[in-house]
Image (cartoon, grey):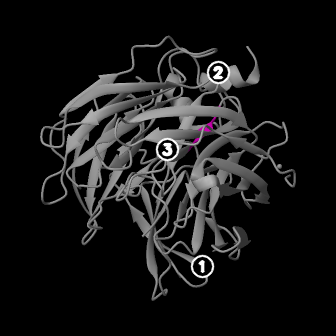
Amino acid sequence: MDTRARTARRRFPLTGRSEGPGAGWSRRRFVGAVAGTAAVVAVPSPAAPPAGTPAVRGEPRAAAPPRKPSGPRPLYVGTYTSADGGGSGIGLAGYDPATGRITGSGTLTGVPDPSYLAVHPDGRTLYAVDERQDGGVTAVRLADRRILGTRSTGGAGPCHLSVHPGGRWLLSANYGSGSVAVHPIDASGALGERTALVTHSSPAPGPGQDGPHAHQFLTGPGGDHVLAVDLGTDTVYTYRLDQGEGTLTEVARAAARPGAGPRHLTFHPGGRCAYLANEVDDTVTVCAYDPGTGRLKIGEPQPTGSQGGTNYPAQFLVTANGAYAFLANRGHNSLARYAVEDDGARLRLLGTVPVGGDFPRHIAFSPDGRLLFAANQRSGTVSVFHVDAGGGGLRPAGEPFASPVAVCALPL
């Protein structure tokens, strides 16, 4: 079995030991360094969007239009509480929106393995996955940091969650069992019992895979459709979400090339294009998207800037003006920079910037789009960069902030 096949089977331990048979989903926590050549890949240009086509409202979202920084802002850091050297809960910190400097302020305990975090659109409630064999999702009221409760996701190893833009539904992806779940959100921000659970039973697992592995569950432009990215089946599934009942109806599938291992999808603000990071074959692809039908068309693979070294791309971000995209490269330990062209239908690789840490698992913009945060899993740090929205440049904002097994950084 080659290296990338082993990657797909979750066998890259942080400690140097294999997780062993049956661990399966736990490899998520352990899948755990040059540019210059312009690389361009295009997809068939989608039809021009009709007047009034809504911008992207899914998660992860593009940064909001710049605003004047004012006072320290909160930063929440996800970790693995059960990993060697891991944290004891959700890391609490603050950052200066002008300088990017991070100052730690403690830990919110009581949430096991909170490896991915998201916030409600009203800003009052934080949600975390409990990435364990018996997976769960936990709600935390931010005003007093009170845990509002935990609900089962109905699967193993939930690794991603997002809140539907309407604020009534929480979407989560169970990596270990290859399923996606929906939970209702009440007026207090607390979670109700699951309203939907769908397991990806087909197509058959891709090369080197042992089954389906749902890696992301997000809302598409317009809000009517939700998309599940499955690394194990090399497929992106589109579902129609009944926003009254919280149920899911499959409406489309998009097949990545066999062995690609799609991990993370991000939409262009125009709503007609998206960018897919493929973890296993170290590529990215541009996708065309139809908001009316929810159909996604995956384009041809293109480079990540790793130049052929061992690398596992993790996540894309797109600037609010849709002009630039950034990719986190684990292994190459860099942030790839792309110019976005042709109304989102083309990516041109501009180069890479060292991330200043080891294994950047998650990246996020500050709400004003002026800063980019990178959570570096193996070095246990969070790096911060100033973002040049006009030219797509990244400039380090001081020394990285130390945080145990940092796998998610959520600036508010």
Indicate which disc, 1 or 2, sits on the residue closer to the N terminus: 1
Position in image of residue 135 (x %, y %): 34, 34
Name the one closer to the observer, 254 or 69. 254
Is residue 362 shown to the viewer in this render? no
Which element is circle 3 on?
A: loop
Amino acid type at mark 3: Ala
Mark 1, residues whose alpha carbon is within 10 Å: few (<14), some, or many (≥20)?
some
Measure the C-alpha gap from mark 1 to mark 2.
40 Å
Q: Tell me the tag on residue 259.
A: 2
Rendering quarter of residue 370: bottom right
| Residue closest to the eye, 404 or 294 | 294
Measured in 3D between alpha carbons, the distance from the residue under mark 3 to the one under mark 1, in whole angstroms, is 43 Å
Asked if the magenta segment contains residue 299, the reply would be no
The residue nearer to you, when weighing 270 against 328, is 270
Of labels 1 and 2, the one closer to you: 2
The secondary structure making up most of the magenta span is strand
> What span is in magenta?
275-279
State the residue lying farthest toward the top. 204
Label at residue 101: 1
Q: Nearer the viewer, residue 178 or 239?
A: 239
Q: In this view, does 374 lie above or below 209?
A: below
